[in-house]
Image: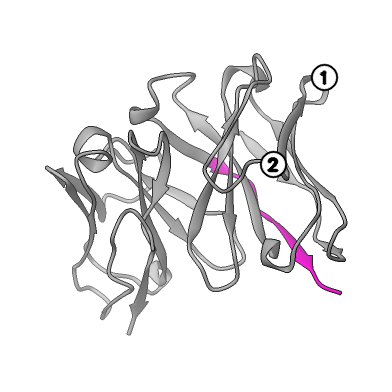
Amino acid sequence: QSVLTQPPSASGTPGQRVTISCSGSTSNIGGSSVNWYQHLPGTAPKLLIYDNSQRPSGVPDRFSGSKSGTSASLAISGLQSEDDADYYCAAWDDSLNGRVFGGGTKLTVL
Amino acid sequence: QVHLVQSGSELKKPGASVRVSCKASGYTFTTYAINWVRQAPGQGLEWMGWINTNTGNPTYAQGFTGRFVFSLDTSVSSAYLQISNLKPQDTAVYYCARELPSYSNSRGTWLDPWGPGTLVTVSS
């Protein structure tokens, strides 16, 4: 059972906009910045969003992040086939004194 | 470019030990902490802890104390994960990742880049 809660799956067709949610508590998301990682099986996870809404260099602006209270979300607009991957949110948890991940969301581009 | 290169897959028997290496390049190794993350088959990412590359001081997440040891060799810009008394449930891909920004408040840090992962399989 992950500390951060994500939907196990999401889907969309090319060109659509999808949103992935990440729910936590005051001990993690409520007091920490949220990061998002994209993971294709067999490869290294890739940083997608840091500090709630910042995109690293090279990440398309189709990807955006937001945070409100104890929840965060990742939005992907103009969905492309290469976006078919697993997405994880992460934050620091003060109660556990450690980094926590969501359970991951498998995004399928139909 | 910043890269983390990890050692190759390992097949071990229960009770044995394994050491996974993570070699950094493209930056000053001691400027950033290294984190370790595990992904068991069919499961999500699980944070194992981190090591201060300046002091060598490790911090272990709950569930990763005792059999898990983080270490460094700064002369070759490398971090290591050693797991002793391996159990079948240790079968997983183990990732190292650089933590940014440099030694900041943990609440505002992130992991980038990640190594490609090392598959450790424990089976008799």
Q: Nearer the viewer, residue A93 or B3?
A: A93
Which chain letter goes with mark 1?
Answer: B
Q: Which residue is mark 2?
A: B66
Q: What residue lies at 25% left-to-right and 40% top-to-bottom?
A: A52
Mark sitting on residue B75? 1
Outermost residue, front direction?
Answer: B66
Classify mark 1: residues with Cα within 10 Å, few (<14), some (14-19) or many (20+): few
Q: Nearer the viewer, residue A71 or B59?
A: B59
Q: Where is residue B36? Give x, y as percent.
A: 60, 42
Q: Say if mark 2 contacts mark 1, CB within 8 Å.
A: no
The first of marks 2 and 1 along the sequence is 2
Which chain letter goes with mark 2?
Answer: B
Q: Secondary structure at mark 1?
A: helix
Q: Is residue A107 left or right of residue B3?
A: left
Q: Secondary structure at mark 2?
A: loop
Outermost residue, bottom direction?
Answer: A110
Q: Where is residue A60? Give x, y as percent.
A: 33, 51
